[in-house]
Amino acid sequence: MLRVGLTGGLGSGKSTVAKIFETLGIPVYYADDAAKRVMNENVDLKKKIIEHFGEESYLNESLNRPYLAASVFPDP
């Protein structure tokens, strides 16, 4: 089975290409969605994220993405 990874910057068309693939019946795995789900549902991972980045990493049991992004990528 051939596997293709779509990469590129913001606005480069990754989502458009993925939707075209789906329209053609090609299965698409959305890694970003899976990562978000794991970071919200996996208790061990949540614990590690909180240990490393602090309690602010989660608000109301959901990943605080803006806080975490600012912590991980502080220099534009």
Image: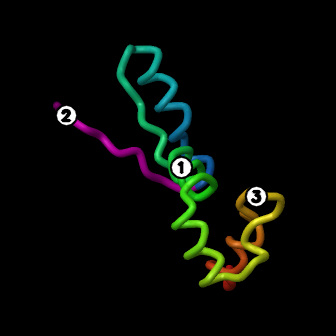
Q: Is residue 2 above or below residue 56?
A: above
Contact? badges 1 and 2 (CB < 8 Å): no
Kindly identify which numbered label has been placed on residue 2.
2
The residue wearing badge 3 is 61
Percent x, y for residue 48?
55, 76
Q: Position of residue 62 (x, y in %)?
A: 74, 56
- In the drawing, what numbered circle is on residue 32? 1
Q: Is residue 20 above or below residue 6?
A: above
Whether residue 36 is situated above or below residue 66 in the rendered picture: above
Horizontal side of 21 relative to 2 (left or right) equals: right
What x and y, as percent, mark residue 4?
29, 40
Residue 58 x %, y %: 75, 66
Q: Amino acid at mark 2?
A: Leu
Instruction: Say which residue appears at 68% left-offset and 79% top-offset.
Output: 76
Give the magenta part as a residue range: 1-9
Position of the N terminus, as image quadrant, is top left
Magenta residue check for 38: no
Q: Amino acid at mark 1?
A: Asp
Task: Give the CA separation, mark 2 to mark 3.
Answer: 38 Å
Q: Residue at x 41, y 45 (%)?
A: 6
What mark, if any, has residue 11 been given in the picture?
none
